Image: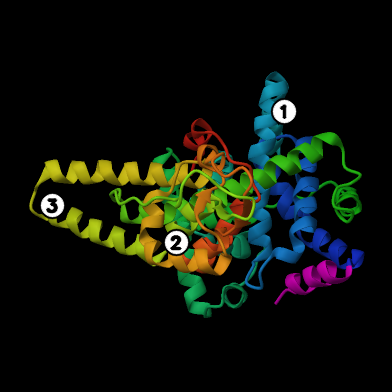
């Protein structure tokens, strides 16, 4: 089995250039191919590859022990490619179209030596492949990358995913069927066997000979000597990765259960009068972090289970009016939670779930009231008060799962965005 994580730990712990160079050499073709397939521009694909490995260098210490590095790199390459295309469309739309056409011609020439059926299938699915992979769950995605991009056998795939050889085979086959369905809906008819064959044969192309060396040299110093265009790409991609992860944390439960309803309970976030003294201490919190934590909390899950039961009951009874109402409420809940998680919308309805815990939080923090850090109106009533951040205490009071807790902590590192921007963030 590979030693990707061992090499990653050697680099993260000891800044080992040799370890990082080995990782680049092992995975540069994979990253370059994902980028090239998406942007159809060899030069831009090289820049994306540089950006991906700079991001890896910066995030090396934070990747968990269960990370499938090839899968992580594949996803990051797609994020970087999407970001690069956005930048490129703004400044050179006509040039991009020319690159895309020339690259398509090159692909056609390369495939001319293959069977006509296989060549036609790859030409059809190549522009769709990255989008199809994006629709797979993480384990299905990583299984496909390990099996067809890296050429691993089912035993090795299973070992990487913590499953048996038979389970890995079943997962790969299910993922292939999902890919086939995705392609069929977009007018590409084929079999899972042919899809597996063409992905294995064409999904990873050789990167330019000098790219691995230049990637290592730039990434090893965290991109400090990279060009301005690559650094812009790195910054935008990291931001996109963060927003996507937080979007998933907020929307997963509501999306799975389809319906929901707003809880209208409310509490006061402040206590005491408007007057204050220089000795007063007030607790402040990031409302976005509270919303993200709530999305992974037992209280939210219980609320949704109850609403789902109402939906199923109405649906079974043929009560179409109630079904439509519950669907609308569910959509409204999801939108509200996303706005609370990304912008500065109040979270009084969420704090209502931990009303009993608030007095103890105030006592332990030594504060007289708890106010959102974005609530300027209330904060102005306490101009001389010492502010104590109680965000983490509120997060823990909600008892979120580990994934939601980490996302809640991470969102605090980002600046809030407007409601308009929050509504535009795509799943």
Of residues 314 and 413, the one drawn nearer to the viewer in this rendering: 413
Q: Are marks 1 and 3 in contact (CB under 8 Å)?
A: no
Q: Nearer the viewer, mark 2 or mark 1?
A: 2
Q: From this viewpoint, is residue 289 visible? A: yes
Residue 245 got which mark? none
Q: Nearer the viewer, mark 2 or mark 3?
A: 2
Question: How far is disc 2 from disc 1 in space, using C-alphas?
Answer: 44 Å
Residue for point 73% across, 71% down: 5
Q: Which residue is mark 1?
A: 99
32 vs 183, left or right, is right
N-term-proximal mark, 1 vs 3: 1
Residue 194 screen position, x and y as percent: 51, 54
Residue 296 got which mark? 2
Question: How far is disc 2 from disc 3 in space, using C-alphas?
Answer: 26 Å
Residue 126 screen position, x and y as percent: 59, 42
Label 2 crowd bin: few (<14), some (14–19), many (20+), radius 10 Å: many
Q: Quadrant of the N terminus?
A: bottom right
N-term-proximal mark, 2 vs 3: 2
Residue 314 got which mark? 3
Q: Are marks 2 and 3 in contact (CB under 8 Å)?
A: no
Question: How far is disc 1 from disc 3 in space, using C-alphas?
Answer: 54 Å
Of residues 272 and 8, the one drawn nearer to the viewer in this rendering: 272
Residue for point 42% across, 38% down: 187
Which image quadrant for residue 145?
bottom right
N-term-proximal mark, 2 vs 1: 1
Residue 247 screen position, x and y as percent: 51, 48
> Eyeballing the image, is 311 above or below 101?
below
Residue for point 56% across, 77% down: 162
> Eyeballing the image, is 399 above or below 284?
below
The region drawn magenta spans 1-14
Q: Main secondary structure of the magenta part?
A: helix
3 is within the stretch colored magenta? yes
């Amino acid at each position: 089995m590979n030693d990707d994580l061992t090499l990653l730990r050697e680099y993260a712990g000891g800044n080992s250039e040799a370890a990082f160079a080995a990782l680049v050499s092992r995975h540069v073709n994979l990253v370059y191919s994902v980028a090239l397939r998406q942007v159809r521009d060899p030069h831009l694909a090289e820049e994306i590859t540089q950006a991906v490995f700079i991001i890896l260098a910066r995030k090396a210490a934070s990747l968990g022990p269960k990370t499938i590095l090839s899968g992580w790199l594949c996803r990051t390459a797609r994020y970087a490619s999407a970001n690069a295309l956005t930048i490129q469309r703004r400044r050179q739309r006509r040039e991009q179209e020319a690159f895309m056409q020339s690259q398509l011609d090159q692909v056609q020439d390369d495939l001319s030596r293959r069977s006509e059926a296989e060549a036609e299938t790859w030409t059809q699915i190549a522009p769709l492949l990255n989008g199809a992979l994006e629709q797979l769950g993480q384990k299905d995605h990583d299984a496909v990358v390990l099996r067809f991009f890296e050429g691993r056998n089912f035993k090795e795939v299973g070992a990487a995913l913590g499953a048996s050889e038979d389970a890995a085979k079943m997962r790969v086959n299910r993922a292939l069927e999902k890919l086939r369905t995705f392609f069929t809906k977009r007018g590409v008819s084929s079999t899972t066997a042919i899809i597996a064959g063409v992905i294995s044969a064409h999904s990873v192309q050789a990167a330019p000979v000098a790219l691995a060396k230049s990637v290592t040299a730039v990434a090893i110093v965290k991109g400090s000597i990279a060009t301005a265009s690559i650094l812009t790409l790195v910054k935008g991609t990291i931001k996109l990765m963060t927003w996507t992860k937080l979007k998933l944390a907020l929307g997963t439960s509501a999306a799975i259960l389809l319906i929901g309803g707003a809880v209208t309970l409310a509490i006061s976030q402040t206590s005491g009068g408007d007057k204050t003294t220089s000795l007063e201490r007030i607790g402040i919190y990031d409302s976005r972090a509270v919303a993200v934590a709530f999305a992974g909390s037992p209280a939210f899950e219980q609320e949704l289970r109850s609403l789902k039961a109402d939906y199923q009951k109405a649906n079974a009874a043929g009560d179409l009016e109630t079904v439509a109402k519950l669907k609308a409420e569910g959509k409204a809940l999801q939108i509200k939670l996303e706005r609370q998680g990304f912008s500065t919308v109040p979270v009084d309805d969420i704090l209502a779930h931990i009303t009993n815990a608030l007095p103890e939080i105030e006592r332990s923090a030594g504060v007289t009231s708890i106010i959102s850090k974005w609530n300027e109106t209330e904060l102005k009533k306490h101009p001389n008060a010492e502010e104590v951040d109680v965000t983490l205490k509120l997060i823990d009071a909600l008892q979120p799962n580990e994934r939601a807790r980490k996302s809640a902590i991470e969102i605090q590192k980002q600046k809030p965005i407007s409601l308009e921007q929050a509504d535009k963030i795509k799943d």
